Amino acid sequence: MTRTSRHHSSTRADRTPPRLDKGAMRIVALGGLEEIGRNMTVFEFGGKLLIMDCGVLFPEEHHPGVDLILPDFSYLRDRLDDIVGLVLTHGHEDHIGAVPYLLRERADIPIISARLTLAFIKTKLQEHRITAKTVQVKEGDRKKFGPFDLEFLAVNHSIPDGLAMAIRTPAGLVLATGDFKMDQFPLDGRITDLAGFARLGEEGVDLFLPDSTNADVPGFQISEQDLAPAIDEVMRTAPRRIIVSSFASHIHRIQQVIDAAHLYGRKVAFVGRSMVRNMKTARELGYLTVPRGLLVDFKELDKMDPKKAVIICTGSQGEPMAALARMASQDHMIDLTQGDTVLLASSLIPGNETSIYRLINDLTKLGANVVHKGNAKVHVSGHASAGELVYCYNLVRPRNVMPVHGEHRHLKANAELAIRTGVEPKNTLVVEDGTTIDLKDGVARVTGKVTADYVYVENMVAGAATEESLQDRIRLAEDGALTVLAIVNPDNGKLEEDPEFFPVGWAPKDGELDKATDIVEKTLAQLKGQKTGPDAEHAIAEALVRWSDRSLRRKPVVTVIIVDA
């Protein structure tokens, strides 16, 4: 499915939710359901709100001109003062990228998270000139924020300091895993706290919110350590420069690359603003270890033996403005040449396939050897596969399950795993963004739906684009535009002469627009009121679009200009 589609589940309720019952907790995801990204979930109890994560979704090709896609904050806008905190489970952009835009609504919302995540968000907020109120927590901590009693547990993911969160209120106990997997040999030695999950299971988990991204992948994920041989081989055998592309937050993977580069006497340069920023933060906090003398400025690489150069950059998802894509399009200071090796060291996010394969093709045309997940063991997912999820279900034994973080197929697969481990089918809630779930007395049920639309960001301005304007852009790209200049006598509403037609983005065949003059005349004759002005221009434009769609199989964006004779 595409990210803009929305599946209607059997549990969907298209109605405004009722007033929350006394003693009940309401849960509503404003993003992260039926999509990979834009993760944001709101919990309500006792008149107060707690938010978990506030991330972005990255645009696809059918979002021309869009930089980011945010959750819709309209559900919160009238209740900003009721928010007691924003918990960030980890530092990936799909969980923290929208925080600056939320803080524009209310700047002093407390941000609660672990050390590295807070460091990443503080740096991001500096670029937006926002100073945040932060509360640092770690696994094992238990703190109250308003009526919410929060406990934090360690989870292993593809970034350090991932947290799961248990929420206790009189309505019941909720456990949200955040993004997690069960790597038993993690590079940082920090494993998912399965003992903590089991302890909460003994206490009684009323609602479980598990990561669904890999719910349809059988078995267990391999360990990050298992990638070392493939990365080692690239460093040992590459004949020239090595360009490694990764998420700017994937510190574990970048540490592996640095260690292998050091082993084979190569120098490393970071390229890309977010990569440089995050790696600087990670080094300062001790999450990334760089041997003395290994790191160089990328401008020095041209002076070095190509066999000794490693570049670590962003752009593994084919993002058009990221460093690797600009290298592939020869629009970057670093020129890729025959014999260079490009290592794509990140996952293929669903929805990005076309962009990534185009990137691989463009890199190959330049003579680069591209090493990626499809031809080498250079990536392992940060999300639990089906076997790990089943293991967790058997530990937690939840009464109710609401799968999160995934497209519809992932949510459905996760729900089926829950049912196979003994959760009642009626207690597995496969829902979409905006659906409200009320939890009371151990029962979770769908109670309504609130607005959870896409909010588009262009040039750091939220809401600068709309669905309608994006459709116009797509039509411009696919069908072109047509400008019509018509000179009309305002007294009788008739054309003084044949209109002039100016097509852009397409070349009409001879005689193809002859009928268009008749359409203009007929529309003018049918107008009841003013024959000139905006209403007349709009009517003619709509008539021409209908005619063009029917006769030419083309729907250009039509602009009509009427000039009084």
Image: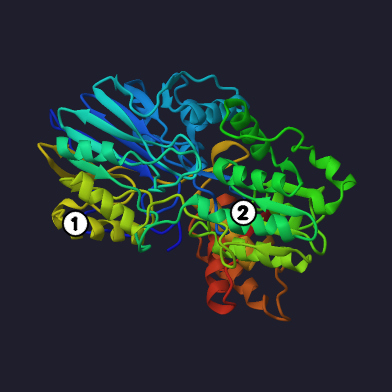
Asked if one can make out residue 496 in the rendered structure from this viewpoint, the answer is: no
Mark linked to residue 316: 2
Badge 1 amino acid? Thr
Percent coordinates x, y for residue 514 in the rendering: 67, 77
Relative horizontal placement of residue 264, taking residue 447 as reference (left or right): right
Q: Residue at x 31, y 47 (%)?
A: 210
Name the image quarter holding residue 413.
bottom left
In this orientation, which residue lies closer to the viewer: 358 or 543?
358
Callout 1 environment at 10 Å: few (<14), some (14 to 19), or many (20+)? some
**Is label 1 in a helix, a strand or a loop?**
loop
Q: Which quadrant of the figure contains the N terminus?
A: bottom left
Indicate which disc residue 421 carries.
1
Q: Is residue 382 left or right of residue 85?
A: right
Tell me: residue 186, above or below residue 474. Answer: above
- Element assignment for label 2: loop
Q: Nearer the viewer, residue 476 or 256?
A: 256
